[in-house]
Image: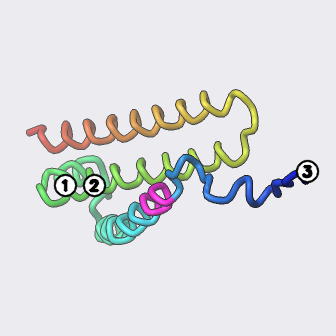
Amino acid sequence: MTSHRVTPYSAAHGRGAAGHAAHHWWAQRVSAIALVPLVLWLAWALANGAATDYSALTVWLKAPLNTILMILLLIAAFHHAALGLKTIAEDYIHSRARFAVIAIVQLACAAGGAVGIVAIIVIAATN
């Protein structure tokens, strides 16, 4: 009777992170690609004096296109940050605290995005 030795590769082959690795990878890339034109738009707007002072910023944010693009920028940025920070936590925290850290990161990113979106809407809606 011979015993079958299982190598580490064969034990791990085909058993990724519950099959979510490809989705996470694509989500990270899509959010990064979405951020490129949004950040370039914001840099262009700021270079052209959109935020020289608070009143100029509020006038600039009241334009519907600027409001929508700023909200999209916040969504993409906080989603991208959450994905990246989750990956860092999964790769470098090897204790029971990993779940708590990931939960805190996800909640903080969701809260930051929500607060930013509400702030933009409030600024855009003021007279």
**Circles 2 and 1 in contact, beta carbons < 8 Å:** yes
Q: Mark 2 points at which residue?
A: 72
Question: Which amino acid type is shown beneath numbered disc 2?
Answer: Leu
- Between the residue at mark 2 and the residue at mark 3, the CA separation in whole angstroms equals 63 Å
The percent position of residue 82, horizontal first and vertical second, equals 49, 46
What is the number of the mark on residue 36? none
Which quadrant of the figure has residue 123?
Answer: top left
Of labels 2 and 3, the one closer to you? 3
Q: Give the range drawn in magenta.
A: 22-28
Number of numbered markers: 3
Is 23 part of what is drawn in magenta? yes
Per the image, label 3 sits on a secondary structure element best described as loop
Q: Residue at x 40, y 61 (%)?
A: 31
Q: In this view, does 83 lie above or below 22?
A: above
Is 98 on the left or on the right of 83, as rendered? right
Earlier along the polypeptide chain: callout 2 or callout 3? Answer: 3
Q: Which residue lies furthest to the front in this view?
A: 1
Q: Name the residue under label 1.
A: 68
Per the image, label 1 sits on a secondary structure element best described as helix
Is 118 part of what is drawn in magenta? no
- Between the residue at mark 2 and the residue at mark 1, the CA separation in whole angstroms equals 6 Å
Q: How is the image coloured?
A: rainbow
What is the number of the mark on residue 1? 3
Question: Which amino acid type is shown beneath numbered disc 1?
Answer: Ile
Of labels 3 and 1, the one closer to you? 3
Q: In this view, does 106 lie above or below 52?
A: above
Q: Is the magenta stretch mostly helix, strand or loop?
A: helix
The percent position of residue 68, horizontal first and vertical second, equals 19, 54
Q: Residue at x 29, y 70 (%)?
A: 48
Which quadrant of the figure has residue 64?
Answer: bottom left
